[in-house]
Amino acid sequence: MNPSHLFASLLWSSIGVGYCIYGRRQKSVVPLVGGVSMIAVSYLADSVLMMSLVCIGLMAAVYLLLKRGY
C-alpha cells in the first residue's frame, strides 16, 4: 500500500459513508446502494486511477438517478 492509495481510499470511503447516512435517513435506496458500492470499490480496487474513475461514475449515477426521481 502506498500513501496515495490510502488517501484515495479514505476520500472515497468517506464520501460513500456520507451517501449511506443520507440514504438511510431519507429512506432512499439509490444513495444507500451507491454509498455501499463506493465503500466496496475503495477496498477492492488495486489502482488509484481505477478506484477514482469508478467512484466518480457511481457519484454521477446516483445524481442522475435521483434527478430522474428514483
Image: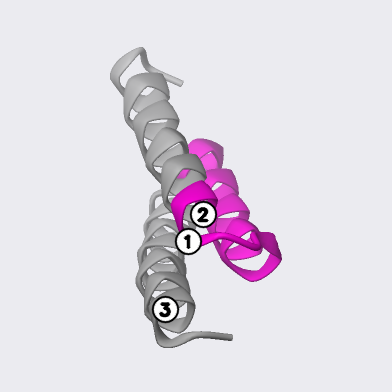
Q: Amino acid at mark 2?
A: Met
Q: CA distance from mark 1 to mark 2?
A: 5 Å
For label 3, the residue is: 10
* Residue highlighted by disc 2: 51
Is disc 2 surrounded by few (<14), some (14 to 19) or many (20+) residues within 10 Å? many
The segment highlighted magenta reads 28-50
Instruction: State whether residue 10 is above or below residue 42.
Output: below
Where is residue 20? Give x, y as percent. Answer: 48, 60
- Is the residue under label 2 in contact with that under label 1 (CB below 8 Å)? yes
9 to the left or right of 66: right
Mark 3–mark 2 Cα distance, whole angstroms, equals: 11 Å
| Label 2: which secondary element | helix
Residue at point 41%, 64% (across, down): 12
Tell which tag, 1 or 2, sits nearer the viewer: 1
Q: What is the quadrant of the N terminus in the image?
A: bottom right
Q: Residue 68 falls in which quadrant of the image?
A: top left
Query: What amino acid does circle 1 point to?
Result: Val
The label number, if any, that marks residue 59 in the structure image: none
Which residue is painted at 65% across and 63% down in the image?
A: 46
The earlier-in-sequence mark between 1 and 3 is 3
Which element is circle 3 on?
Answer: helix
Q: CA gap, disc 1 to disc 3?
A: 11 Å
Binning the other alpha carbons within 10 Å of mark 3 as few (below 14), some (14 to 19) or many (20 upward) gives some
Q: Which mark is residue 48?
A: 1
Can you say whether 51 is above or below 67 in the image? below
User: Neighbour class for label 1 at 10 Å: few (<14), some, many (≥20)?
Assistant: some
**Front in this rendered view, residue 68 or 5:** 5
Is 39 inside the magenta-drawn segment?
Answer: yes
Q: Is residue 25 above or below residue 6?
A: above
Residue 38 point in image, percent of width and height: 53, 55
Q: Of callouts 3 and 2, which one flags the residue occurring earlier in the amino acid sequence?
A: 3
